[in-house]
Image (spheres, rainbow, N blue to C red):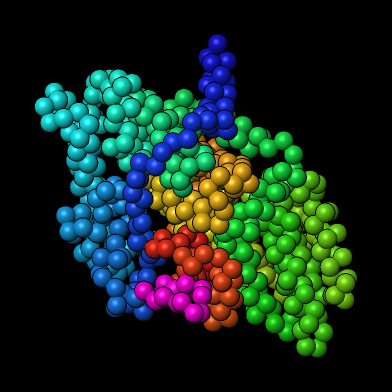
Amino acid sequence: MKTSQQHRGVASIHHKLYHPPVQQIDAYGYQILENSVFPDTGSQGNNVSFQTGKDDEEQFFTLESSPATAFVACDSPSAVSGLSNKSPFSPQGSHSCLSDQHHSSGNNYGSPTSGCSVVEDDNEFKYRLREVEVSLLGPDSDIVDSHFCCHKSGMARWSQSQIATMIPKLNLKDVLLFCAHAISEDDLYTATSWMEVLGHMVSVSGEPMQRLGAYMLEGLRAKLERSGSLIYKALKCEVPTSSQLMSYMSVLYHICPYWKFAYTSANVVIREALENEPRIHIIDFQIAQGSQWVPLIQDLARRPGGPPCIRITGVDDTQSAHARGGGLHIVGERLSKLAASCYVPFEFNAAARCGSQVELHNLRIQPGEAIAVNLPYVLHHMPDESVSTENHRDRLLRLVKSLSPKVMTLVEQESNTNTSPFFSRFREMVDYYTAMFESIDVARPRDDKQRINAEAHCVARDIVNMIACEGAERVERHEPFGKWRSRLMMDGFTPYPLSPKVTDAIRILLKEFNENFRIQEADGALYLGWKQRAMVTSSAWR
């Protein structure tokens, strides 16, 4: 009986997610906080610039020329993000967080030293919640002093008419945080009441925050119903055909630069690291369609003195196979035909397994090869020591290190959700995905069905997974570059310096996209940002 009820709950959530109300929701003047979340720049912070990719309108933001409050030093970018109508950069909200903008020698993960107090942050949150109580219920309400974030009686007084009246007064980001906070406190009645309010505020065809809110609401519902893994699997299986999934992935690939940034930056590094090598072996742990290697093969075909012999090992996963409509032989055939047309000696090795299952014999290493390893948006899927004693993340890194590669390229989301407790993780997600949805929004009309489908089928499932799932079932585990750097160095890697050619190539790439995409180099990594928010990092190691 319990199982059948759980499945009905998932079906209901799934129906609401993909069949939103026909009625259009008016804009309520939501203020989306644009957090100034820059990478940790350590002792070199004063020399960092964050710039656009457009030559004719380059903008430079340096610590020497911009206000000191543009960089907030806290362990987590979300730790002092505050709420939408209360800037964390205001004097009352930020003084405790600006005591030190440099590294502490005892900070293993490279995060800035923080003066932020968890207690202070929680008190600020409760203060904001009390402000909402007063605004919605009036100063004479008998629950104003109850701090209903800690008491379950307050929300019970809100009728449907009150909800309709108060919605124009509410900020969507605030309500998402209030709901998540109630869930984190096991205040289920308050959480469900906030969900009812959210249901009137979100829309998969609305503004970026409304669209993000729709998917975060489904994650919160799944979290509340303890059905996270079920709805996550349902979302993964929603796409009926591989051609549709391929088209949705293609939309995101072309309208925002996150994948092109990964491919372009890695290719420049690999091209330089393998210069003059007669036999090269590229091991790609996220081969997908193999598109990354088309321009590199063409470039190597024109190398003075003739092209090298190229071997590419492609590691697969079930999602990529589904999107391709078949196995790795499709990628091998495509790249082999391209190499033949360019007169490049070529061999493709298929390793049809997910990265955490790869063993040395799957890679078919041959003596005399110059090896390059590519890890684009894949390492955060590997469970680490916080999930399992098997620690596939470090096991894979040790395997790569044993190959003595000329270079290993790493591209990852700049977000901190791996080991964070639920509410901290949720706040970080709100900030990160607000920026992502804004960056997607500028490329297509608001009612563009292709963009709506791409978000629903390629982004929503990741959001639901991070909100609703825990343990081994939570496969989306982003970490900021500081943590990746610490882990890699503990596993014996050293940074591989990025040449100016990498930045130049990305600057040219960004000319194809909105001017709010920006780049910044810090601590040996190249950051891609949207406005003032760092989104992705690209780095190289050996």
Left or right position of 187 against 471: left
Question: Whole-percent x and y of residue 114?
Answer: 27, 59
Q: Quadrant of the C terminus?
A: bottom right
Q: Residue 258's quadrant in the figure?
A: bottom right
Viewer can see residue 423: no
Q: Position of residue 508 (x, y in %)?
A: 58, 75
Magenta span has 54? Answer: yes
517 with respect to 77 (left or right): right
In the picture, measured across the screen, residue 338 lies left or right of residue 249, that is right
What residue lies at 51% left-to-right and 56% top-to-bottom?
A: 442
x and y percent of residue 318 in the render? Answer: 71, 44
Q: Is residue 167 magenta?
A: no
Q: Residue at x 36, y 79 (%)?
A: 47
Q: Quadrant of residue 186?
A: top left
In the rendered structure, the answer to whether residue 201 lies left or right of residue 55 reads left
Which stretch is magenta? 50-61
Q: Residue at x 21, y 45 (%)?
A: 124
Say if residue 114 shows up in the picture: yes
Q: Residue furthest bottom?
A: 305
Which image quarter is the N terminus in?
A: top right
Q: Compare residues 261 and 266 and report the one nearer the observer.
A: 261
499, above or below 71, in the image: below
Residue 106 location in percent, x, y?
31, 64
- Number of residue marks: 0
Q: Residue furthest left?
A: 140
- Residue at 46 percent across and 25 percent down: it is 225
**Camera-nearest residue between 366 and 140:** 140
Closest to the observer, 63 or 468: 63
Residue situated in front as seen by the camera: 158 or 396: 158
